[in-house]
Amino acid sequence: MNVSLRWLESLLPGLDADASEVADRLSATAVVVEEVVSIGEGLEELLVARVQEARPHPNADRLTLCRVEAGGESPVDVVCGAPEVIEGALYPYVPPGATLPDGLEIEVRTIRGEESHGMLCSASELGLGRDASGIMRLDDGLEVGVPLTDALELPDARLVLDLTPNRVDLACHVGVAREIAPGGTAQIVLPRFGESWEPEWEVHESRAEAAGVSVEIEAPERCERYLGAVIHDVQVGPSPAWLQSRLRAIGARPVNNVVDATNYVLHEVNQPLHAFDLGRLQGRDVRVREARVGERLRTLDGVERELRPSMTVIADAEEPV
């Protein structure tokens, strides 16, 4: 279980302890903290930058010549090797003279006949994730020229907990906050998001219906309760910077606002969520049932797996989803 110190501090405004002190307290009273990992150290010189223009490098097929605005008097040219650079998007920028976490000092270089004044970075190069396939796109709402550490709420620290079966309550940030709150659970502050509301469902013995959608439990001995809500007018896009930062701090990869919201809730309060695209849900049904002989499911790692009746699946009207 990975825990972010900054995330804990947001839940416990009165927490007055650094990562080592929190780790010692948890190890002494609850569960062993195997490791404390620094997140975002050495990024103090990096800036938030906007790519004003991106065009093919005149002397190299796989390079892009970018015009980059980073808060200075005028934009600068940066040669980038990423497969895709989006004009108008924001990215982490390393100016000449700055140093990356691995010790690499960035300087003005001539690359295939074009001067590159700095570097646009991937999450892997910054130590903020494993994705090295392209440069790390930032939230569009950030201010150009501000320090990257301020924009991403860094530095942070990741506490790696060696969870035991009897302490599943520590499998989320609220659980850990409850354990270390110096004044008890009354000190925990949960953020409020918008107005509270309750879905209005027509409920039957093992099935519920609303907005033309049906949720049915076909294997009650395996699943006693399954809750759902229908949400319309969702615009899929990047999550805000603070949410992406919290996920990166625990080693998760931000995907989009829908996926990130489900992961955020899971890691904050230990409540698993599934998000389905209603337009792709066949029959507009969600069914909790046993897997059928011969059914197959492609998992998130891209592998197609054969299912067995001993497995429980969430399916639409026709197949597991």
Image (cartoon, rainbow, N blue to C red):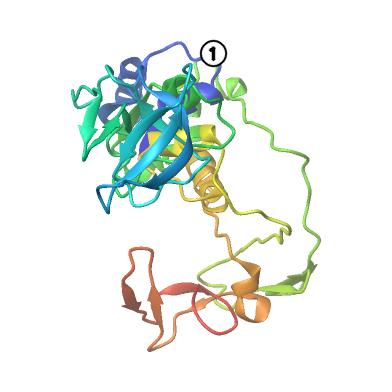
Q: Name the residue under label 1.
A: 14
Q: Which residue is drawn at 52% across and 77% down?
A: 289
Residue 179 makes an appearance in the image: no
Dividing the image into 4 quarters, which one contains the N terminus?
Answer: top left
Residue at the image point whose x is 54% and y is 21% from the top: 12
Asked if residue 231 lies left or right of residue 263, the reply is right
SS of the residue at dot 1?
Answer: loop
- Find residue 45 and report its image quarter: top left
Which residue sits furthest top? Answer: 16
Q: Between 122 and 269, which is closer to the camera in this rendering?
A: 122
Expressed as whole percent of the image width and height from the top left, the position of residue 296 reads: 39, 81
Can you say whether 185 is above or below 218 in the image? above
Residue at 55%, 15% (x, y): give it: 183
Residue 320 placement, left or right of 283:
left
Foreground residue among 159 and 66 = 66
Of all residues, the one furthest to the left in this rendering is 103
